[in-house]
Image: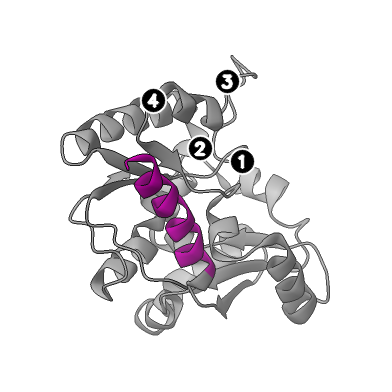
């Protein structure tokens, strides 16, 4: 992967991915000084999502001419009131200099559909899997805001392969060691096992680089 600088790009992301982005910043891959996060779990409240996203983009533009939005598409923003309004449309409405990562949701940023199928075959025998990233563990009460046990029972148990956490930052190892009771309670609440699966952040880095290159090319 060719090295590229993000120093003149501001990044606006769903807070669910703050663990991965801060990790990439600390290791030196992301050399931007400008990371802005929306509240995790706003796919449950798309009007607040849009409000926060536009506000963060506005703040980001005060710091840099180029803004990279780290949000998925059709799974992160579903507008029941305006079904034709999409995340792609929101980004297109911003003037030049704003790009969005090419992925459907945060799990897709970490592992492609083909990679996820391979992992499901490996750990769940091809059974249906509920996919998560570490942010879904850390920010559980925001991501599943308003969910009770009844709603959990409606959604999770049909994923007989369990909940697989695509962990590219080693968060689950620490979490399970420091909060074993919370981890077990989370799994009990879901009604399925939670399975940590270590991955690299290579795909995420590649997708970020792809959009940074487009932003940089557009500014020349």
Q: Pointer 4: what residue? A: 94
Q: Is residue 39 visible?
A: no
Residue 43 marker: 2
State yes or no: discs 2 and 1 in contact (Cβ < 8 Å).
yes
Asked if the stretch drawn in magenta spans residue 213, the answer is yes
Question: Residue 194 placed where, x, y %?
Answer: 60, 71
Horizontal and vertical percent position of residue 64: 20, 41
The mark nearer the N terminus, 4 or 1, is 1
Tell which circle, 2 or 1, labels the residue nearer the N-terminal end: 2
Give whichever of discs 4 and 2 has the lower sequence position: 2
Q: Earlier in the sequence, mark 2 or mark 3?
A: 2
**Circle nearer the N terminus (1, 3):** 1
The answer to which of 175 and 83 lies nearer the viewer is 83
Counting other residues with Cα less than 10 Å from the Cα at mark 3, is it few (<14), some (14-19), or many (20 or more)?
few
Using the image, determine if residue 32 lies above or below residue 14. below
Which residues make up the magenta segment?
203-220
Q: Say whether residue 205 is visible.
A: yes
**Residue located 55% across and 70% down the image:** 166
Residue 188 in the image: state x and y as whole percent.
59, 65
Extreme top residue here?
81
What's the magenta bit mostly, secondary-structure-wise?
helix
State the residue position of label 1: 75
Disc 1 element: loop
Mark 3: secondary structure: loop
Residue 55: x percent and y percent?
27, 28
Q: Residues within 10 Å of mark 1 (few under 14, many from 20)?
A: some
Taking the magenta stretch, the answer to whether it contains residue 71 is no
Which label number is shown at residue 128?
A: none
Mark 2 is surrounded, within 10 Å at the Cα level, by few (under 14), some (14 to 19) or many (20 or more) other residues, namely some
Give the vertical position of 59 relative to 95 (above or below): below
Query: Residue at label 3?
Result: 85
Residue 179's place in the image compared with 35, above or below, is below
């Amino acid at each position: 992967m060719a090295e590229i600088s993000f120093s003149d790009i501001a990044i606006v992301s769903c807070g669910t991915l703050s663990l991965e982005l801060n990790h990439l910043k600390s290791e030196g891959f992301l050399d931007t000084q400008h990371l802005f996060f929306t509240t995790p779990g706003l796919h449950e409240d798309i009007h607040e999502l849009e409000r926060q996203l536009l506000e963060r983009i506005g703040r980001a533009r005060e710091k840099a001419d180029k803004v990279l939005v780290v949000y998925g598409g059709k799974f992160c923003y579903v507008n029941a009131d305006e079904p034709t309004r999409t995340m792609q449309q929101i980004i297109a409405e911003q003037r030049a200099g704003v790009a969005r990562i090419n992925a459907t949701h945060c799990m897709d940023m970490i592992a492609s559909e083909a990679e996820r199928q391979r992992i499901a075959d490996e750990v769940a025998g091809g059974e249906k899997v509920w996919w998560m990233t570490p942010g879904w563990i850390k920010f559980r009460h925001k991501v599943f805001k308003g969910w009770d046990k009844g709603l959990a029972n409606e959604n999770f148990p049909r994923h007989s392969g369990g909940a697989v956490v695509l962990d590219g930052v080693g968060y689950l190892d620490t979490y399970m060691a420091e909060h074993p009771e919370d981890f077990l309670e989370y799994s009990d609440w879901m009604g399925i096992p939670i399975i940590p699966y270590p991955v690299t952040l290579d795909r995420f880095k590649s997708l970020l680089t792809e959009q940074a290159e487009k932003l940089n090319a557009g500014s020349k």
